[in-house]
Amino acid sequence: MTKLYMQMRPNELHNRLMKRIPEPEVREMMKDEIARAKKIQRAERLSALQRKKLWGALISPLRYEHSNAKVGLRHQGRNLPERHAAFSAYIKLMEKLLLKFEALILLRDDNDKLMTPSHVAREMSLPNNGVHWTDWIPQTKRVEVCALFESIPYTPKTKRKIPFQRTQRPSTKLKERLLNRTLKELGNEETEQMIAPTSVRAERIKKIKRAIKSIHSLKPTDAVPHTWHGLNLMDDE
């Protein structure tokens, strides 16, 4: 019954409860219960959308690279046996990862909640917090595929394929969002530091400022993490 009430507009709900529940106190308790249920439902819906967005940001560059590799496989020219072996191995590895992601999307934590990519990455101790799909490829497999591409004889005027590049489809929106979030966090930290300065916060402010420099240097095709913590920051010299 609560689900039915949750779908009603405020006036419709009020009229329905007036007819069904004559006691004012019980009626207000019912309204509070419905409001809490709607709040939980909204939070779950937003969480699901955010989770879908995060997995999509991880998988989209993989699908893009998979599509490009299939074009490379169909290319006709010199050194076909070597090219076929390299591109086939690369494509097979990406297809296995796509299937793996399909399973990981359904993975739940100890509280029976669906997990985000970064959560799964931490559980698996992946490098770079699993920001880019290449972080999910075992190093041994990467070495094997890279060796196959390197074994393709050099051909003049033919661009050599470099597998496992940490790139994404050209976009500036992700960079802008990351920059805005990081600038906002910096402002909050600096305000707190003015009120109650600590050495720990001072060091964090330095890291955030290094992160902002790193974000500015990102190219449109570079992999962009969800937060600045996913950046590989170099200490100031």
Image (cartoon, grey):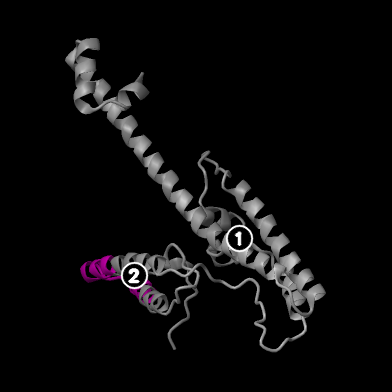
- As measured in the structure, the alpha-carbon distance from the residue carrying label 1 to the one carrying label 2 is 27 Å
Q: Based on the displayed image, in which of its 4 quarters is residue 22 positioned?
A: top left
Secondary structure of residue under mark 1:
loop
Residue at position x 65%, y 73% in the image: 163
Q: Is residue 83 above or below residue 122?
A: below
Whole-percent x and y of residue 46? 38, 44
Q: Which residues are magenta?
A: 187-207
Whole-percent x and y of residue 61? 55, 63
Whole-percent x and y of residue 118? 52, 57
Residue at position x 47%, y 76% in the image: 233
Q: Which mark is residue 201?
A: 2
Q: Which mark is residue 125?
A: 1
Q: Is residue 15 above or below residue 33?
A: above
Our reading of the magenta stretch's main secondary structure is helix
Judge the density around disc 1: few (<14), some (14-19), many (≥20) Cα neighbours within 10 Å: few
Is 200 magenta? The answer is yes
Q: Amino acid at mark 1?
A: Ser
Residue at position x 57%, y 57% in the image: 121
